[in-house]
Image (tube, rainbow, N blue to C red):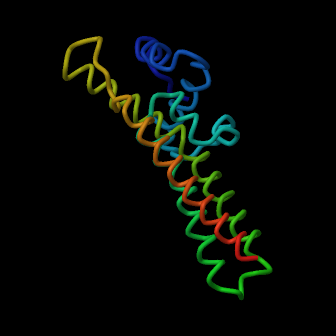
Amino acid sequence: MTQFKPQFKGKIENFVDQHAKYYVDVFQDMEFKGSKLSFNIPVLFVGSLWFFYRRMYVLGSLLFITPIILLVCLLLLFKSHSFFSEYDSVIVFGVLVAIRLFITSIANYMYWKKFLAYQDGLRSQNNKNVVVGTNSFAPIVACIVFFLLFCWLLSGMMQGMRHT
């Protein structure tokens, strides 16, 4: 099996910091075997928060907000159509599980792409202090949007409870 050169492996270890051996192995598979899907256990349990931990703020925000918006849309759809009433919770749960499994399978590939972008940034800037990614404003916007969606959803539920 082909492996990274020690110098490149050191760059990966410096970039990843914690659990570097795991990511070196995964990145080698992606580079030399061409695999794009892998199973990341932490993403399975914490979801989009892992992307924030790994400094992928925009992707983390999108993956945090998308299931919430989808959940609200599905709930509104099921509320307006009575023929789903028996299976609506099963369908919503299945969709959310499928989204989580998809996110779990692409997380390492997205992290690999972030590392490659970071390396390109270092090469083009010739500077070790290049910051690749987004600014820290994105998580704040994501939290505000989540809070507003939650308040909107909660107020809609409270309106429905008053009429029963």
Residue furthest to the bottom: 83
Residue visible at 59% across and 73% down? 76
Front residue (pair 140, 156): 156
**Residue 59, quarter of the rendered image:** top left
Q: Is residue 23 above or below residue 92?
A: above
16 shown above or below 93: above
Outermost residue on the left side: it is 125
Q: Nearer the viewer, residue 150 or 120?
A: 150
Residue most extreme to the right? 86
Q: Residue at x 65, y 78 (%)?
A: 79
Q: Is residue 124 left or right of residue 26?
A: left
List x then y, in percent, for residue 93.
Answer: 72, 63
Q: Residue at image x 54%, y 37%?
A: 108
Q: Position of residue 156 (x, y in %)?
A: 60, 66
> Can you say which quadrant of the picture contains the N terminus?
top right
Q: Is residue 63 left or right of residue 135?
A: right
Q: Nearer the viewer, residue 155 or 14?
A: 155
